[in-house]
Amino acid sequence: MDTIETKDDQRLKEELGDLLLQIIFHAQIAKERKKFDIREVIENLHQKLIERHPHVFSEKKKLATEEVLKNWEHIKLAASRAKKKSVLSGLPRHLPALLKAYRLQEKVARFNFDWERTDEIFLKIEEEIKELRRAYKKRKKEDMEEELGDVLFSWVNLCRHLKINPEFALRKTIDKFVKRFNYIERRLKQKKISLHEAGLPLLDSLWEEAKRSAV
């Protein structure tokens, strides 16, 4: 992900090689266990692409991106039913929570389980924040944790409706924070003041200076 974002083609070539190594490595282990080989991996992918893209390989229809994704989920669910699987069963357990919430909401939305209007999500966020405040007043950590999770989940829903990936949005904010804090450290070094000695008023002042400098 980092290499794609930096648009470094040479590094991307190297990283794709590392990824490919993992695929070949696991396929070889499976082959030695007499389970499957790399040829079967490719054939399985080939068949899946054909089955889940009938608009390309059989019906020859022009579909919008959202329709293609919806078709993919419906075809996938039909295949999963034979194996008694849920529409959500394909989500990796260890996916980062923010990204997992986004993917989960995407999946159920393709079966019309979704907010009709974005404005409704803003109201839901306000409602969840009120519930979080009530839990905060009681100082019960377990309740606060649950309510805060609901707030975050609602914010992810808003991101999805605005067609903004929350993982990417948060990564950009983290990068911006790091750049501005690095600016503060540089300015303190120029002033010959240590970070421990600076104090909040000076740190806040330098933070605003960083913002004005478009850091």
Image (cartoon, rainbow, N blue to C red):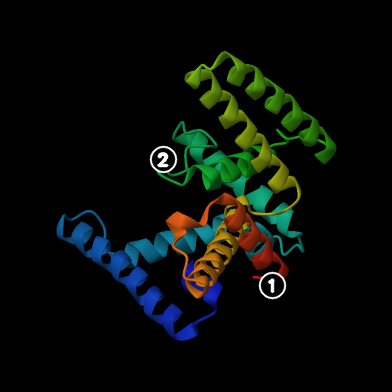
Label 2: which secondary element: loop
Image quarter of the C terminus: bottom right
Residue 81 appears in view: yes
* Residue drawn where x is 82% and y is 36% of the image: 116
Between residues 198 and 209, which one lies in front from this camera angle?
A: 198
Type of the residue with mark 2:
Arg
Residue 117 appears in view: no
Residue 213 is marked as 1
* Residue drawn where x is 63% and y is 40% of the image: 105
Question: With 28 as the anchor, is 118 left or right in this view?
Answer: right
Q: Position of residue 65 (x, y in %)?
A: 72, 59
* Disc 1 and disc 2 in contact, CB within 8 angstroms: no
Q: Position of residue 135 (x, y in %)?
A: 60, 18
Between residues 213 and 176, which one lies in front from this camera angle?
A: 213
Question: With 34 as the anchor, is 41 left or right in this view?
Answer: right
Between residues 93 and 113, which one lies in front from this camera angle?
A: 93
**Height in image: 182 above or below 35?**
below
Q: Nearer the viewer, mark 1 or mark 2?
A: 1
* Residue drawn where x is 69% and y is 47% of the image: 160
**Which quadrant of the figure has residue 18?**
bottom left
Q: Residues within 10 Å of mark 1 (few under 14, many from 20)?
A: few
Mark 1 and mark 2 lie on one chain; the one further toward the N terminus is 2
**Height in image: 149 above or below 140?**
below
Total of numbered circles in the picture? 2
Type of the residue with mark 1:
Ser
Q: Position of residue 72 (x, y in %)?
A: 61, 51
Q: Which residue is mark 2?
A: 93
**Which quadrant of the figure has residue 115?**
top right
* Residue drawn where x is 39% and y is 74% of the image: 15
Q: Residues within 10 Å of mark 2 (few under 14, many from 20)?
A: few
